[in-house]
Image (cartoon, grey):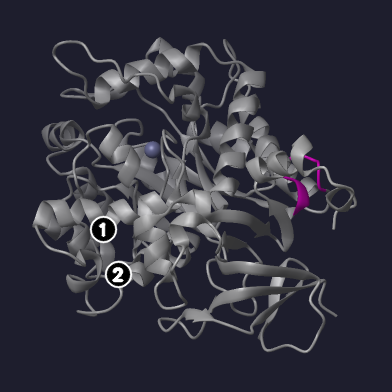
Amino acid sequence: MPDHIIEPELTWTGPPGEERFERNVRIAVENGRISEVGALSDEPTHRLPRTAILPGFVNTHSHAFQRGLRGRGETFPEEAGDFWSWREEMYRLVKSMDEQRIYELSRQTFSEMLDAGITAVGEFHYLHHSPGTGDFALDKVVLRAAADAGIRIVLLNVLYRAGGLGPEGHTPLSDAQQRFAAPSVDAFWEQMDRLAEVVAQGAGAPGLCGGGGLSSLGVAAHSIRAVPLDELIAFSEEAARRGMPLHMHVEEQPREVEDALHHYGRTPMGLLNAHLRISPLFTAVHCTHTSTADLDDYLSAGGNICICPLTEANLGDGLANVPWMLRHDGRVCLGSDSNSRIDMAEEMRWLEYGQRLATLSRGVCVNRASRGAGHVAERLLHAATIAGARAIGLRTGAIRPGFLADLVALDLDHPPLAGADAETLLPAFLCGSDGGAVAGTFVNGTWREKMHRTRRSLSPRSMSPRSMTGG
Ligand SMILES: [Zn+2]
């Protein structure tokens, strides 16, 4: 017997590559997974008139605490700012934060993600320690914040070993970076073993850290700047042995490419291709300045690339060669990264719009890709769902039996969607609307109404006896 039967007005369904919005579809959910999709005879437990259901969005790359920088770092000295001056601002934020503040910021960030239709996040987490300690206490704090917000999380715990990469090799960590450090690679894996216990304990008990089975673990190497190559090789072998996703910042800034060329005689991506076993469990984040030859080697080995359009724009990183990346089907996913804005519709839109501006053409994310033609909105949705799920090792991102019951409901009465029909709704959402269209989400089959809507429904004006009984 299903636990829930969901009945929206429109459901995004169909075989892979041929999905579209259909009417008269019900979704059955059992033990947090979709068990059946179709014209089911069971009575609905969740009737959602005037909504359209999509797979929940997967945010492949986030640093939740950086939400604390929103609105800061936007005042510039005469010489203007760049990524490195932003990083100084971020380090100042790190210094000011204790456990409570990290919890609050992370919880706020994860709630905003749910409000924007993001049901799963890959949290690239490197702020490990309470001030003045090496206690790794903040790893659990972030898991607890995600559990309390109700989002599915893959904690991509980050190995951070060096301050930077100079001509003579890696430099020691600066004061500001001490809270990111692992004393050794072995000590890092011991912390991963402790976290595995925390996640396992929480799996059957909502409210505990890691609660409700919504948490799992992966790892990340911060960057070629922060992890020496010999350690990175051993680290990636251990991650593969454990079957864990491994993520890494790669070539976000030209300086990183120059530093690696100077010290190693190869680009960062060239080093990864030459020394690591690249597989679908590996995700390179950004690749803004990666050469086409390096991209070909990396993508043909099965690696994923996570693009973070809004953050890359905010930080002035540059524009990645997305058309080239998309020649390798389905390898590009999306992340909200610095969380200066949390909106997957905008991330999808700017994955395409950035390329339109750069190439003076339209439909770049389909026309330059291997299929040669098609609907750009489907392609963008693929990046925000199934491609992201693959990168963080989750079976979510599609409305099919066996997939996790992580879904997003769009409000068809949201004014920017007025006039859209089943054919035009997805492009109308991606080009003309934003997370404001999200009515709520299902995570593991549990419905969560959007935060600001819940507040609105509690306003005195709507406190009629009918609404008070929950009608
Ligand atoms: Zn990042």
Vertical side of 28 occupied by 91: above or below: above
Q: Are marks 2 and 1 in contact (CB under 8 Å)?
A: yes
For the point 12% across and 52% down, the residue is: 358
For the point 67% across and 35% down, the residue is: 145
For the point 22% across and 24% down, the residue is: 82
Q: Which residue is mark 2?
A: 376
Q: CA distance from mark 2 to mark 1?
A: 8 Å
Q: In the image, what residue type sits under mark 2?
A: Val
The quadrant in which the C terminus is found is bottom right
For the point 57% across and 10% down, the residue is: 132
Q: Is mark 1 within 8 Å of ligand 1?
A: no
Write the start and end of the magenta stretch as one range. 206-212
**What element does badge 2 sit on?**
helix
Residue nearer the viewer, 37 or 444: 37
Q: Is mark 2 within 8 Å of ligand 1?
A: no
Most frequent secondary structure within the magenta stretch: loop
**What element does badge 1 sit on?**
helix
Left or right relative to 76: residue 17: right
Q: Residue lying farthest left? A: 360
Give the image quarter of residue 148.
Answer: top right
Residue nearer the viewer, 412 or 21: 412
Tell me if residue 6 is in the magenta stretch: no
Q: In the image, what residue type sits under mark 1?
A: Glu
Residue 469 x %, y %: 90, 52
Q: Which residue is mark 1?
A: 352
Give the image quarter of residue 242.
Answer: bottom right
Residue 442 x %, y %: 67, 60
Residue nearer the viewer, 255 or 309: 309
Badge 2, how many Cα within 10 Å: few under 14, some, many 20+?
Answer: many
Residue 155 x %, y %: 57, 44
For residue 359, say whether it is visible.
yes
